[in-house]
Structure formats: structure tokens, C-alpha cells
Amino acid sequence: MDRSNKPSAIGVGASVPQPTISLRDNTVEATLPSGESVTIHLYGATVTSWKLANGKEQLFVSEKAHLDGSKPIRGGIPVVFPVFGPPPQNHATSSLPQHGFARNSTWEFLGKSSSESLGKDRSGDGSVKLDFGLSRPMLTEYFQKAWPYDFGLVYSVTLTKESLETSLQVQNKGSQNFDFQVLMHTYLKIDDISDIRVKNLESKTYADKTQNAAVITETSPAVEINKETDRVYQSLDPKVPIIVSSASDDKPIFSITREGLNDVVVWNPWIEKAKGMADFGPDEAYKNMICVEAGSVAGWQTLEAGDFWEGGQSIRPRL
Ligand code: BG6
């Protein structure tokens, strides 16, 4: 029988555009239906590109960065674990290289969840979450000897239309406690360092690594970068965003909130240090980057046998 008001068939999800994901040459790329994209190298689980729908890149990667796994990638978001900076002497991390082993180990792609499976907060927003794993058996023999703990890391990179979120879960799979530091060493791409102001750091203390880690209280409501800058701001409220803003229009370029990451490193190598880094280029590129690195690095997190820890950041760009 022919019915004039017969409803059309109800599609089962087929009509909702989904993110596209590819794994090729040890690199995972995801693109949202709305056009935003992210690229992650399995080496270091380093996010090396984050583009907005208009194609504008948000992360700085040095033109001379090594992308072949021979050296940590100079740019993007390298993951620092289990030690920040040069390891202290007489410590369980003492034999590790600067910034640990996570950024120079090859991670495994564990898969994705898209908005449909990410719960009601995300339903219909077309976001995608990509998970990466690293555990003790995946480390080189050298790293296994240098840091003798049984651990598992799950690093999640979530791309939404409005943000990039990165979070790390650390599991102690062994029978001894271990101490760790962690940091998301984010290289933000900017047009001109002289126009940058970093806000919401006023009255916070920082260790100035350009002055033998002298502890100083920040007096500026809008920190300018006009020389080599290497500061570890400590004990911040992670819910208060760090704002990277433009002095010319006083508007945020990036806003960074954190969870479980109470320290923030602000780093720019400036002229001489930039020239001195073999994998940093071109020389003037220090003008086009600022590292704002969310971490837990001022002290140590102690993780008891069998326990988990989680922390992360959310970066919102000017749209
Ligand atoms: C920053 C440190 O996090 O990383 C700086 O505070 C360091 O001291 C910078 O120079 C870069 O480190 P690397 O090991 O990637 O050259």
C-alpha cells in the first residue's frame, strides 16, 4: 500500500560524519569532519602538528628537527618522563638522559575513540581521542637498565573543534614504589615573540634556570619574553588558565588549563641558545615559538606499587 506520509528509513549512525584516521610511516593522523587535524609520531608519541579548520598550524616544529627516531623531536609536544631536565645525582633517574626516555622511545598506537563512544559530553561534537602506550618491555635495553621499574603509560591525545587535550596515565606495575616527574613540553607557534605576553603568573614563584635556579616571585601580570627565558613556575592552580596573549590587541592566542599538573615551564632559547642547538632552525625561529610546558616537575610524584596517576592539559586556541 502506498502511504503519502510514510517516514523515511532511520539511519543507524551512518549519516554522522566521522573523523578520519590513518597510521602510516609510524605516524598517526586524524582529521575531524570539520577540518581540524592532528599528527602524532609514534617516536616519543610526539604531537607534531595541530591544525585548525582554516589550516593554521598551532605547534612549532623546527625545520631541522629529526623525524627519523635518531633524536627527540625538536618541536610539537614531546612527553617528558620520568625526569625533567638533567637528572639529579644519586637518584633512581641518574643514568637517564635529560628529560628521560618517553620522548625517545617508540610508543604503540592503542586505537581511537570518537565522539560516539566518548560519552554524552562529547556526543555530536565530532571529536576524536587517540591513545598511545609505552611500557617497560618496549624500552631499549639501555633504558631498562637505567630505570629498573615496571611501569605502563597511556597517553591520550584528544582533538576537538575548540581544543587539543593531552593527558598521561602512569601505572606502577611493579612491586616497588617509584618517583617520577612529568611534563608536556609544548612548543606553541606564534607570529612574533615581541608581541607575546604570558598572563596569570603574577605573584607566583619560579626557579630561574638562567640564574642557577634562583627562586624569584613574578611581579608582572603580563610576562614579556625579551631574552633567554627558562623558568619553572611552581604550585599554580591548574584550573586557572595560563594565557598566552597578544600585546597588540590584548586578546588570548592560547589558553592552557591543566589537571594534576601544578607547575608550568616557560622557555624560549633566544638568539644564542637557538644558534647553539644543532636541530633548531632557522636561527631566527626563536621568534616564532614559545614553550609553555604543563608539568609536575618542581618535586617528585611517588607512585606506590600497583597505583595509577593521571594528569593532563587542555589548550584552547584563538578561533
Ligand atoms: C626546557 C628546559 O623544558 O627544555 C630547558 O627548561 C631546556 O632548560 C629545554 O633547555 C630544551 O631541552 P632539550 O633537552 O630538548 O634541548
Image (tube, helix red, strand yellow):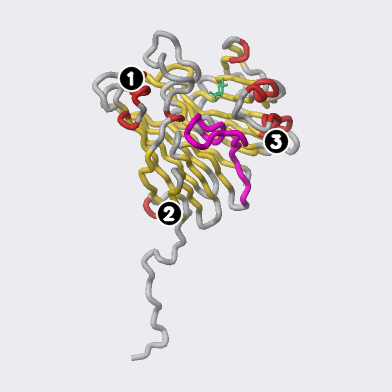
Q: Is residue 224 left or right of residue 119?
A: right
The quarter of the displayed image where residue 216 is located:
top right
The circle drawn on residue 246 is: 3
Identify residue for label 2: 123
| Residue 49 horizontal/vertical position (percent) | 55, 42
The circle drawn on residue 11 is: none
Q: Amino acid at mark 3?
A: Ser
The quarter of the displayed image where residue 308 is located:
top left
The alpha-carbon separation of the residues under discs 2 and 1 comes to: 44 Å
* Residue furthest right in the image: 248
Q: Nearer the viewer, residue 70 or 167?
A: 70
Q: Is residue 76 above or below residue 117?
A: above
Q: Amino acid at mark 1?
A: Lys
Q: Is residue 255 left or right of residue 181?
A: right
Identify residue for label 1: 145
Q: Residues within 10 Å of mark 1 (few under 14, many from 20)?
A: few
Q: Nearer the viewer, residue 301 or 141?
A: 141
Q: Assess mark 2: CB under 8 A from ligand 1? A: no
Q: Is residue 2 above or below residue 279?
A: below
Mark 3 and mark 1 lie on one chain; the one further toward the N terminus is 1
